Image: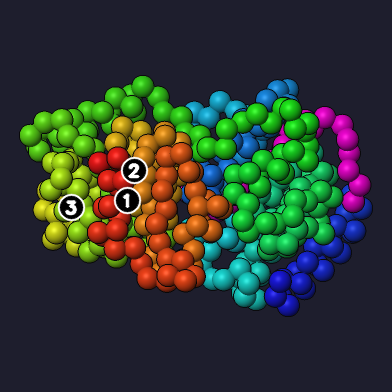
Amino acid sequence: MSLKRKALEGLVSLASLAKGNTSWNENTPKRILVLRNNDIGDLLVITPVFEALKKSFPNTEIIAGIGSWNLPVLELNPFIDAVLTLDAPWHNKQSTTVSHNSIQGFYRSLKYIYTSEEVEILRNLQCDTGIDILGSPEGALLMLRSGIKNRIGVCGYAGGHSGCQKNITFDPKCHVSKAALDQVRLLTKPEKMEVPQRPQLYLNSEESSWAEKAWIHHEKAKGGKSLRVLVGAGAGLIEKCWPSNYFGKLTQKINALHPSTLLSVGTHSDADATQEIKRHTPSVSDICGSTTLRQTFALCSKADLILCNSSMLMHAGAAFNTRTMVLLGPDFKSAKDHELTWGYPKTCTILGPEPLSPQLTTPEEAFEALRQKQWI
């Protein structure tokens, strides 16, 4: 932990002592806040937490505190009683304009915690229990500021554990979903935790029907029923991305083996990557920026195969048991380690560098892996 983080930890400890609520109340919680103000994939991977909490505490109000950009992720979720927008400016790419480790970043965080109307709404909800899934000094201070008596965090990651009465210990080789469920286990008995360690997304019939019609529309343009391949060449950071021309060469090989319907999804900023793919595979349909997040989820549910970077698509694919190949960019040191913390072995394969083999997976290697798995 950096010197700045240690200083923040000291501040959290003092704030906890000042509040005077350092003991744990064993009563059944009335309202539980689950704080996850992070990116889309970060929320998707821990969605089993809501089912685990509601099954353990059916009469308790389960409240999700998330960034506004993530509201579509939790639509129709039957295990959540309320969703509260918390656009907290730390550990995400949407509301964080400067590093949370900088003085300016921490000032912005404190200003949000002590002056935000969103936090005031949370205070008025009077939650008695809170789980900071990430585990951070900022998250602990937010829970303290909100009057949450029972607080659960993470020891050994970003900090904040001294402001919580219960913590899990951070393990870099533990799957993120399991770690989050371990936080819930601090509240309930293990036998009540029979929840699949897989993301949960809920679509209505109209959304599913729209996706099926969209695939059929593009299939007709390609000549009829074919392999449905969803391609996501974008990611939050360019260093995380497998090269766009590699995606192009891979889709070219797939299309040559089996004439396929290939849809490239993402934001408007991913259009350049799609054009690079089309240079190799002209039949790829560019729908970047033309679908909502919910529509993208629906397309995942009806796809035969997803090709993507380490992005939210890998988690959306897992939610629907859609076969997914994740191709890591140069920022990653070990595909095996990445699979341990983020992967889904039954439906997802992750390819990329390893410490003794730091080069990127080639299109030829990815294609051969798909053939060996009989996914194409």
Give the amino acid at mark 3.
Lys
Q: Nearer the viewer, residue 254 or 152?
A: 254
Is residue 117 visible to the viewer in this orientation of the structure? no
Is residue 124 rendered magenta in the image? no
The tag earlier along the polypeptide, 2 or 3, is 3
* Count of marks overlaid on the render: 3
Name which of mark 3 and mark 1 comes first in the sequence: 3
| Residue range (magenta) | 22-40
For residue 58, side relative to residue 276 (left or right): right
As rendered, which of 331 and 285 lies closer to the eye?
331
Q: Is residue 72 above or below residue 245?
A: above
Looking at the image, can residue 180 be seen?
Answer: yes
| Position of residue 123 measured from the top left corner of the image (x, y, whole percent) | 73, 44
User: Residue 277: percent from the left, percent from the top?
Assistant: 20, 58
SS category of the residue bearing label 3: helix
Residue identified by numbered label 2: 373
Residue at (68%, 25%) from the top-left corner? 55
Density class for disc 2 (Cα within 10 Å; few <14, some 14-19, many ≥20) is few
Query: Can you identify the residue that label 3 sits on?
Result: 253
The quarter of the picture where the C terminus appears is top left
In this rendering, position of residue 187 left or right of residue 294? right
Q: Which residue is mark 1?
A: 369
Residue found 20% across the figure and 44% down from its top? 262
Q: Quadrant of the N terminus?
A: bottom right
**Residue kind at label 2, given as amino acid type:** Lys
Element marked by disc 1: helix
Whole-angstrom CA distance, mark 3 to mark 1, is 12 Å
Q: Quadrant of residue 58?
A: top right
**Which residue is located at x 68 percent, y 63 percent?**
158
Residue at (13, 61) in percent of width and height: 279
